[in-house]
Amino acid sequence: MRVYNFSAGPAVLPLEVLEKAQKELVSYGNSGMSVMEMSHRSKDYEAIIGEAEAKLRKIMEIPENYTVLFLQGGASLQFAMIPLNLFRNSNKADYIESGMFASKALKEAKKFGDVNVVASSKADNYSRIPDFSKEQFTQDADYFYICANNTIFGTKFNTFPDTGDVPLVADMSSCILSEKIDVSKFGLIYAGAQKNLGPAGVTLVIIRNDLLGFAKENVPTMLDYKVMAENDSMYNTPPTYGIYMLKLVFEWIEEKGGVSGIEKMNRDKAAILYDFLDRSSLFKGTAAKEDRSLMNVTFVTGDNEIDAKFVKAATAAGFVNLKGHRSVGGMRASIYNAMPIEGVKALVAFMEKFESEN
Ligand SMILES: *Cc1c(COP(=O)(O)O)cnc(C)c1O
């Protein structure tokens, strides 16, 4: 029996995708072998990685002048790869500190250049996206960095900063493909796969071509975007099976009406949960209303014991991984693309019942 899995990551995958992978697990097509057993240089595998990229380009409407990379090292390696590749003129970068992952990213960047923290919501335990204005931006920054969706705190940027000629870089690990975005507004977008794309082990990078080729000579070969771009993500063995799973997820998104179809479902799902939190007398949301995430819904009862009791009862009822991150406490329901609306409705019904009994 499958449970409703509200894990922040690795997270729920579409059942249809898992079933397709199961069907193809032992022998893919006419190959007589599993995708896991294939040479990454084989015709079959080249078709798989090619289709993965083509589908992503289609559903995300990625312009021609951007390169798609399938890398490893998780989102966290990008905290270092971004400064190592994008510091190229002034060696300055602007960062918005909107959560723990943004904070980790800026700490890493400080090892390689001058980091200006434009704004931070740390003092509010990152319960909102901090306010900032253009006057605070560094005119000659090499790039401007944001974390588009703050997985731990349940907030997101509803409008992206207008950084003019300074390339905007966004960590979209927990929101990629959750709603329509205009890729051309960004210099670089990246995402670890294990929230909205597939299994852990793949990191997706979408980079504007004019930003390739600035890694300094002492940057390790494996950390140079240009090397990875020139080799179609196959400078070395890529995470072959993970990329295959991404291909299945992209096909699934296409079947669901593309990103706009997925976005509509996500908005419906989030509204069901937030509307309940706003009328509940027991549970309340922890993120500022205007910055609420569509993907990670954080909430508390205000009483640690009742929170623990709720998480335990929910687990027993088949709603798992609802415990909040230790830095926020309480609960977090991650309702990524693959969480069906039925799961959210069932969770709210369970919360209503728990509320009436407590
Ligand atoms: C999960 C997450 C990360 C860290 O991802 P790893 O792949 O574990 O390095 C970074 N940023 C965001 C927004 C995340 O949600």
Image: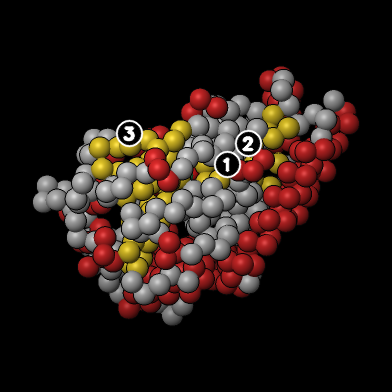
Label 2, secondary structure: give it.
loop
Tag shown at residue 287? 2
Tag shown at residue 107? 3
How far, Cα to Cα, is label 3 from label 1?
21 Å
Tag shown at residue 64? none
How far, Cα to Cα, is label 3 from label 2?
24 Å
Residue 194, can we see it? no
Residue 160, can we see it? yes
Q: Residue at x 64, y 67 (%)?
A: 261
- Earlier-in-chain disc, 3 versus 2: 3
- Earlier-in-chain disc, 2 versus 1: 1
Q: Is the distance from the Cβ of mark 2 to the nearest ligand 1 atom less than 8 Å? A: no
Going by the image, does 274 lie left or right of 19? Answer: right
The residue that mark 1 highlights is: 155
Q: Residue at x 46, y 69 (%)?
A: 56
Query: Does 92 appear above or below 40?
Result: above
